[in-house]
Image: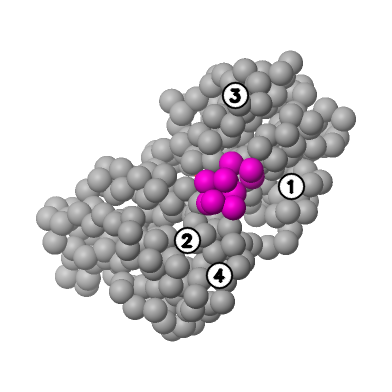
């Protein structure tokens, strides 16, 4: 597999970053994950806009130029024989730094960030899980994503630990909950419930990632006649919902059929969820000209 790092295409096993990069030392960096359908990135502009805003928030002077990033991604699909495949694209921007500037606190514009991009083919398990639905585990409040939950920073330790706990509990995802018992999101997805034909998802003000798929799912849900409300709910309300699903760029719309020991609805992917998933995929293919 060839990857892109700082202007070069090199074998994945040869890719390195400096020991003194702020991303490595302090998690000072941001990332995006974008899904490619038959070699074409979906919603690249939306992802790059989010990255661009967040880079400005953290005072990075580097900005992604959509044309150049698109070119790099296309080059990676060609170099890795992924032009016809579905893959996930990871873009990582980290602070950079050196032994003399271990913790850059000022003149941030003078430090050259590290920019890397790589592709990984999508695992078959995703489409399987979309059909069967998944089980999730509910985490205690300490696993919410820290002080900057709206940013997609390199500080993903709480979610990595939550995902490991999920795996141990034979679940595929983990629900993150705040100290007031509000469901926030899942470790790497946004969360939705449907009750009496109304779709609820936690509001961004609670402190969660403004998922690209969340936003598209809300628009798509309105199109299929669901009333959409951004409102907080707790685990009890989630357990009593008619349907529950997660959203994310790679997993798209993923039905949840079990939360720890409790079954959601009739224990099968919900009808409205499957309808939304189908409509979402149609929208993706339409936007890519398929
Ligand atoms: C914590 C968290 N919430 C939500 C999402 C879904 O975001 P998106 O739809 O932009 O992929 C992600 C994606 O990785 C995430 O890490």
Contact, CB < 8 Å: mark 3 with mark 4? no
Residue 77 position, x and y percent, is 51, 71
The span from disc 3 to disc 2 (Cα, nearest Å) is 30 Å
Upstream in sequence: badge 2 or badge 1: 2
> Mark 1 sits on what residue?
130
Please say whether residue 64 is one of the residues in the magenta stretch.
no
Mark 1 → mark 4, Cα distance in angstroms: 23 Å
Q: Is residue 63 visible?
A: yes
Disc nearer the start of the sequence (3/1): 1
Identify the residue position indicated by label 3 in the image.
222
Q: In the image, which is nearer the foreground, mark 4 or mark 2?
A: 4
Q: Residues within 10 Å of mark 2 (few under 14, many from 20)?
A: some
- 176 with respect to 95 (left or right): right
Q: Are marks 1 and 4 in contact (CB under 8 Å)?
A: no
Q: Main secondary structure of the magenta part?
A: helix
Name the residue rendered at 59%, 52% in the picture.
290
The stretch in magenta equals 281-290
Q: Residues within 10 Å of mark 1 (few under 14, many from 20)?
A: some
Which residue is at 74% across, 37% downward? 274
Residue where numbered disc 2 is placed: 90
Query: Dot 4 corresponds to which residue?
Result: 83
Question: Alpha carbon of mark 3 to alpha carbon of mark 1: how far?
Answer: 21 Å
């Amino acid at each position: 597999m060839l990857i892109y790092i700082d202007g070069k295409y090199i074998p994945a096993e040869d890719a390195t970053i400096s020991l003194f990069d702020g991303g490595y030392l302090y998690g000072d960096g941001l990332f995006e994950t974008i899904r490619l359908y038959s070699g074409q990135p979906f919603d690249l502009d939306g992802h790059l806009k989010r990255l661009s805003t967040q880079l400005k928030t953290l005072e990075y002077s580097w900005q992604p130029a959509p044309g150049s990033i698109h070119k790099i991604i296309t080059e990676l699909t060609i170099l890795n024989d992924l032009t016809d495949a579905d893959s996930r694209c990871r873009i990582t921007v980290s602070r950079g730094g050196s032994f003399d500037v271990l913790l850059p606190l000022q003149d941030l514009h003078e430090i050259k960030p590290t920019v890397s991009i790589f592709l990984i083919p999508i695992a078959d398990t995703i489409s399987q899980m979309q059909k069967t639905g998944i089980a999730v585990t509910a985490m205690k409040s300490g696993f919410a994503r820290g002080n900057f939950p709206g940013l997609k920073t390199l500080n993903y330790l709480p979610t990595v630990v939550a995902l490991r706990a999920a795996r141990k509990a034979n679940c595929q995802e983990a629900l993150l909950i705040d100290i007031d018992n509000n469901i926030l999101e899942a470790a790497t997805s946004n969360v939705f419930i449907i009750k009496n034909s109304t779709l609820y998802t936690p509001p961004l003000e609670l402190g969660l990632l403004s998922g690209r798929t969340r936003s598209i799912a809300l628009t798509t849900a309105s199109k299929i006649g669901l009333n959409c409300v951004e409102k907080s709910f707790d685990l009890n309300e989630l357990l009593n919902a008619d349907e529950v699903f997660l959203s994310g760029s790679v997993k798209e719309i993923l039905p949840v059929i079990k939360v720890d020991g409790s079954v959601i609805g009739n224990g099968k992917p919900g009808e409205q969820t499957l309808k939304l998933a189908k409509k979402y995929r149609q929208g993706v293919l339409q936007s890519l000209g398929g």
